[in-house]
Image (tube, helix red, strand yellow):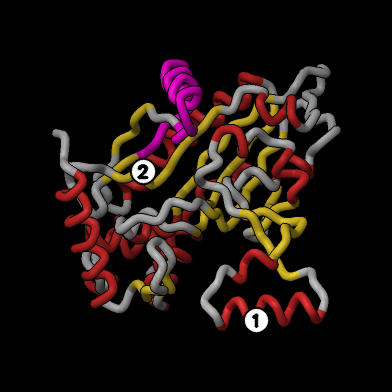
Amino acid sequence: MCLSHEVLDDAYKKYQVELVEAGLLLPSGVQGVYGLSGRFEAIIEAFENYVTLAGQDLKPDVVRFPPVINRNTYLATDHIETFPDLMGSVHSFHGNEKDHIRMVLKKQDKQDWTEELEATEMMMVPAACYPLYPTAANTVLPEDGRLVDLRAFVFRHEPSPDPARMQIFRQREYVKLGTPEQALNHRNDWLKKAEEMLLSVGLAVEPVVANDPFFGRGGRVMAATQKEQELKYEIVCPVASKEKLTAITSSNYHLDHFGSEFNIKTSDGKNAHTACVGFGLERIALALFKRHGFDPDKWPLEVKQILDI
């Protein structure tokens, strides 16, 4: 069923208003940027604990990253070629007192005061696993590869009335670096495990072959290739709309893309392959509120027991 943009926008705005009126989302005046209530944050924490329990027997390395990344690291990837419309660059004031006066006057005159800013050494993190790979650059992995449990804030410049399409959000991931077989098995195993976890908390989910939103004409070719090779799966479910499903988890096989870019080798000297599963924590919380209501005390007992709330 093909829905018009107007119908979808109405559905998005309706759910957004409901969330704001329930006190779960606090509008900032910028589409896709919200404050979160304690009730909302508690559900994120509860589900994240569930993710931790699901992977703790695998004894992963645990890493947590800030929402910014070294600009040189960012430039070592092809993100600027493939997703220029989503990136965020951090700029700041580098001038002297005279420059400062000029900037303040521009602000007072409602002119473009940002002309006085210059790029810093930082970019916003575009994907949760991006900060990981430079930490493994020029290394040789153990024979069984490396498994990493990570979380990071992710920024993507795509303002939208859809409350699930936030511009800054958290991804909790398990990333595998290893041989092609190890990476692909990780992707497939976690795709199944993630589906089971989401079903267990009452969400009507299904895995689908997907592609990233690559930019431009060349990006359409890349997206078709990614889909044809089944490198990316998303687990989708109803959030704001029952007809237009929302991806709340993804499971991706990157081939040797990052192993080659960052010179990460397997024990036999070949470029490492990587794969990840990513849980969109805010989106999962939104899906749970949509499915079970805005008061977690009234959620089904089984769901509350699984999430320990």
Q: Which residue has dot 2 on it? A: 247
Q: Position of residue 185 (x, y in %)?
A: 55, 25
Q: Residue at x 43, y 66 (%)?
A: 33
Q: Residue at x 41, y 67 (%)?
A: 30
Checking the image for residue 42, the label placed there is: none
Q: Is residue 52 visible?
A: no
Amino acid type of the residue that numbered disc 1 sits on in the rendered structure? Val
Q: Position of residue 160 (x, y in %)?
A: 35, 55
Give the side of residue 220 with respect to residue 266, left or right. Answer: left
Q: Is residue 195 above or below residue 169?
A: above
Quadrant of the image containing the C terminus = bottom left
Disc 1 packing (10 Å; few <14; some 14–19; many ≥20): some
Quadrant of the image containing the N terminus = top left
Local SS, label 1: helix
| Badge nearest the viewer, 2 or 1 | 1
Local SS, label 2: strand
Say if the magenta span includes residue 221: yes
Q: Residue at x 62, y 67 (%)?
A: 114
Q: Position of residue 239 (x, y in %)?
A: 26, 52
Disc 2 packing (10 Å; few <14; some 14–19; many ≥20): many
Q: Is residue 34 visible?
A: yes
Q: Position of residue 108 (x, y in %)?
A: 56, 83
Say if the magenta span includes residue 251: no
Camera-nearest residue between 216 and 14: 216
Q: Residue at x 17, y 50 (%)?
A: 6
Q: Which residue has dot 1 on it? A: 104
The boundaries of the magenta stretch are: 212-235
Give the side of residue 26 with respect to residue 81, left or right. Answer: left
Amino acid type of the residue that numbered disc 2 sits on in the rendered structure? Ala
Q: Is residue 187 above or below residue 11?
A: above
Q: CA distance from mark 2 to mark 1?
A: 43 Å
Give the side of residue 291 with respect to residue 260, left or right. Answer: left
